[in-house]
Image (cartoon, rainbow, N blue to C red):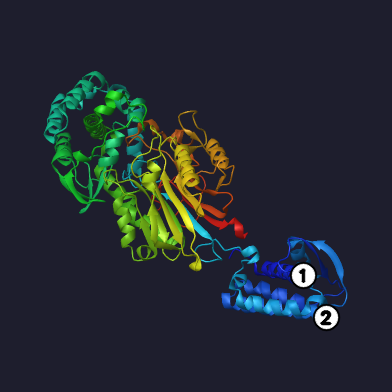
Amino acid sequence: MFANIKDNLCTLWWRLSLKCSSGEGQRQRRIPVLVESHESKLVTILILVSTLGLTCSLPVQSLILMLAAVGLGLRSCFSNSKLSVSTNTTTYKNLIRSRIVRPSYKYKYTATILSATTILFQPNLVRGVSTTNQCETETMTSVQKGISVINWNIAAINNNPFEYWITYENDEYAKLMDDVQEFIVNPGEKDVPIETVFTDTMLHELLDLMKQQGWDEVDISDTKEYWEKNFKGKTIIKGFMKDGELGKKRLASMPDRITNTINTVDGQVYRPTPINCYQGTFQSFEDWWSQWKDFMFEKIIKVNSKKGVATHNVASMILPIKRSKYPAVTEEEERISVPLSTLCAGIFDSILIHMLENVEGKQGWQSLRAEMCQALNMKKNERTVEILRTAYSDVDVMFLQEVANSFAKLIENDSALGEKFEVVVPNTSGKRDQNSIILLNRNVFDASSIEDVTDKIYANFKEGIPVAEGDVLAIKVKSKDMGKGSTYLLASFHGDTNGLATIPVLEVLHTFIQENLKDETVKFVFGLDANTYENAKKGKTQCVKEFAEYYVSLGMNSCHGTTPDPSNYTTYNARTFLQTQLNKACTREEFLTKGDVNPKDFVLFYDKEFSSSNTFKDNTGERKYIERMVFPTLSFPSDHAVLYTELTAKSCL
């Protein structure tokens, strides 16, 4: 409950006094009060009972308030001396708390009658919301509660049990991770030429499969030439795995993101690689290569899309890598990015298999992976849904990012969440399978009023803004608000890794509101993974302070305030060397200096419309946050904390 019952009693008397004396009243007047040397027992008892009423049910609170108001009105009948003071609402509250204020005899009948009838026939007063100045409550679920919101990047794409450093009491795991780290950091003579691992024979087999796939033969030929110039003569660690430019271009990480774990109509399928939950085993390096080729080019899968079920092989899902999103990519690399990134995925996986077969801790790595997958990954979606169901099913709006289509279906089919929430997803091709979505409480919102305006937002993005399909979802929707629905523009957004799209996207949303919705009373709430940084690199990553300065310049505020604390982290993790983005990998010793320890997640709104309260972070799934704890954990499946806040309309404060 946002309002204190005792304060409501004080405020009620202040406003009733104003209306009695001047019709509509003003904010500050001279009002008559009575001061006595001894305390009125009646007033004391009534205020104490009103305070105890905080723990009572709503009907009981209503009765208490009615009796209190009538009693105070009757008490005013016996006032026979006056003291005139200049006061306002706050002062008057304090005077009543001090037990020295009562309405004078002059208003005895008006106060008594108006007190009783107002409380009986104006339920908003009972609920703690003033009707002064015709203030219509802006709270959604009830006039008491306000708008409760969570934002959570659930990290749908990561299905690699070795991705992050975790606390795991297993000697075999510790030995394996230490040996892999040493292999990468200090390879020595183990840093052999790429062509000795990914051989010419493997290259030509792969190029032939690309031709059979129907890819452009010029692009395939140029990919072979690229191999000769950029890969063949280099070493596996310094020349490939630790090549920072390769990481920036996403030539290995992008195809991994698409094919690592694919959600199909028949369930999940996995690329044959050490860095996912592939359930097969590799008897040898040659056995792995055979399984890899079959998966990429021969296996036919069925995936859900907005147009229905699409049937194709895995290779057809590989997408071009755009320079607009990854500026490090050259024009040639962008043109041949489909066959080139497929080649890079093959080289990358071959090096991983080679490395794991040669480190000292190699014994049983496949069985260890199976154990970790069961704990960390196989039940990830179920655990994520469980957190939403048990800890946050009472909220009004859920902004989620990096959501797979299958996860959205999982929510819809959940007996608790599916019945209570309307799941709104963007209209996409389904190839990327990484979307921003919104869940709306059906008790709060009119699902039939939803209007998707995402295409209108995308249409206003300037060329070069690093925004991909599914990153943004924007909708208009009406709240029920006890029959007086308000219109809201709600948006969910997943920023690029560097956060450079965050300000441009916010600018477009703000401009859209000002130019297209200025004639409507529309409330704006924006949940986002902004990918902002505490210690940003100028022009390369988005500084959290600069982001705050920008949204404040638009008249906005956030759940973290107008000057968010840069050390109020919502990510606290570090990547190992068993994942595709080695430019982000850290040794155990480099965790705090090179890890992703940043304030990335926000809920934004216009400052004139809302105030934020009761904001908290959660990295446990239990509505609490443990500082300096590495996550994901075995029980918390994301690398981003849940962010919760409550918004109250300023017009009713």
Circle 2 Cα neighbour tier, 10 Å, few/some/many (<14 / 14–19 / ≥20): few
Q: Dots 2 and 1: beta carbons under 8 Å?
A: no
Q: Which mark is residue 78?
A: 2
Q: Is residue 431 left or right of residue 205?
A: right
Residue 602: x percent and y percent?
A: 49, 46
Task: Classify mark 1: helix, strand or loop.
Answer: helix
Query: Measured along the vertical axis of the image, is residue 424 above or below residue 185?
Result: below
Residue 587: x percent and y percent?
A: 41, 33
- Count of numbered labels shown in the rendering: 2
Query: Measured along the vertical axis of the image, is residue 41 above or below residue 471?
Result: below
Circle 1 Cα neighbour tier, 10 Å, few/some/many (<14 / 14–19 / ≥20): some
Judge depth for marks 2 and 1 and give the one in front. Answer: 1
Q: Is residue 221 visible?
A: yes
Task: Classify mark 2: helix, strand or loop.
Answer: helix
Query: Which sits earlier in the primary sequence, circle 2 or circle 1?
Result: 1
Q: Which quadrant holds the N terminus?
A: bottom right
Q: Is residue 570 visible?
A: no
Q: Is residue 261 left or right of residue 299?
A: right
The residue lying toward the viewer, choosing from 490 and 347, is: 490
Q: Is residue 653 left or right of residue 494?
A: right
Q: Amino acid at mark 2?
A: Phe
Q: Which residue is mark 1?
A: 21
Residue 331: x percent and y percent?
A: 30, 24
Q: Which quadrant holds the C terminus?
A: bottom right
Q: Is residue 257 left or right of residue 24?
A: left
Q: Report the Cα–Cα distance between label 2 and label 1.
A: 19 Å
Residue 124: x percent and y percent?
A: 59, 70
At 24% from the left and 43% from the top, the residue drawn is 366
Name the residue at the front extreme. Answer: 519
Q: Amino acid at mark 1?
A: Ser
Give the quarter of the image for residue 12: bottom right
The residue lying toward the viewer, choosing from 493 and 574, is: 493
